[in-house]
Amino acid sequence: MKRLRKILFVAAMLPVLASSPLYACPACGSANPNFKSSLADGMNAGILTLLGILATVLACFVVFFVHVMRGDESQADNSTPPTPNPTSQNPSDV
């Protein structure tokens, strides 16, 4: 069991210890100012697009909950029941 644990530990640490520029993804490689790639530019544009969509959806949730909270406050102000009109006549009395 201890031997298996050591093998798994070495297998997990191997990618960390053997880091190389060959393993860099296009988004990480774009941090180098001399690195020019249309793949990295496309990936960065995709990341920004998804962040924009996420921000829009979260903003809609915030607006919805603010709307619900304000709606509850306005109904709390109008909590008195309507009073009946004493001058109205019941059609069966006529």
Image: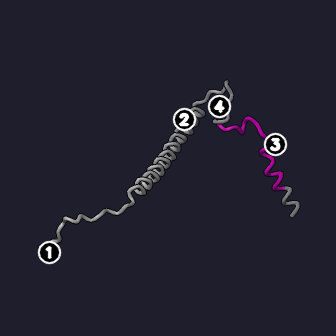
- Looking at the picture, does residue 7 appear above or below residue 87? above
**Which residue was labeled with disc 1?**
93
Q: Is residue 71 left or right of 18 when viewed as pictured?
A: left
User: Which region is colored magenta?
Assistant: 7-25
Identify the element where label 1 is drawn: helix
Please identify, in this view, whether the residue under mark 4 or under mark 1 is nearer the observer.
Answer: 1
- Mark 2 is surrounded, within 10 Å at the Cα level, by few (under 14), some (14 to 19) or many (20 or more) other residues, namely few
Residue at coordinates 17% horizontally, 71% vertically from top-left?
Answer: 90
Q: Secondary structure at mark 4?
A: loop
Mark linked to residue 45? 2
Return the disc, 3 or 1, that comes first in the chain's sequence. 3
Give the secondary structure at mark 3: helix
Majority secondary structure of magenta residues: helix
Residue drawn 57% across the image and 39% down it:
47
Given the image, on which type of amino acid does mark 1 rest? Asp
- Residue at numbered disc 3: 17
Upstream in sequence: badge 4 or badge 1 = 4
How many numbered marks have been drawn onto this rendered protein structure? 4
Q: Amino acid at mark 4?
A: Ser
Q: Under tag 2, what secondary structure?
A: helix
Task: Tell me which residue sits at (67%, 35%) in the image.
Answer: 28
Mark-to-mark CA distance, 4 and 3: 22 Å
Res 94 quadrant in image: bottom left
Kind of residue at badge 3 = Leu
Give whichever of discs 4 and 3 has the lower sequence position.
3
Question: What mark, if any, has residue 30 been given in the picture?
Answer: 4
Asked if the residue under mark 4 is in contact with the one under mark 2, i.e. CB atoms within 8 Å, the reply is no
73 sits left or right of 11 in the view: left
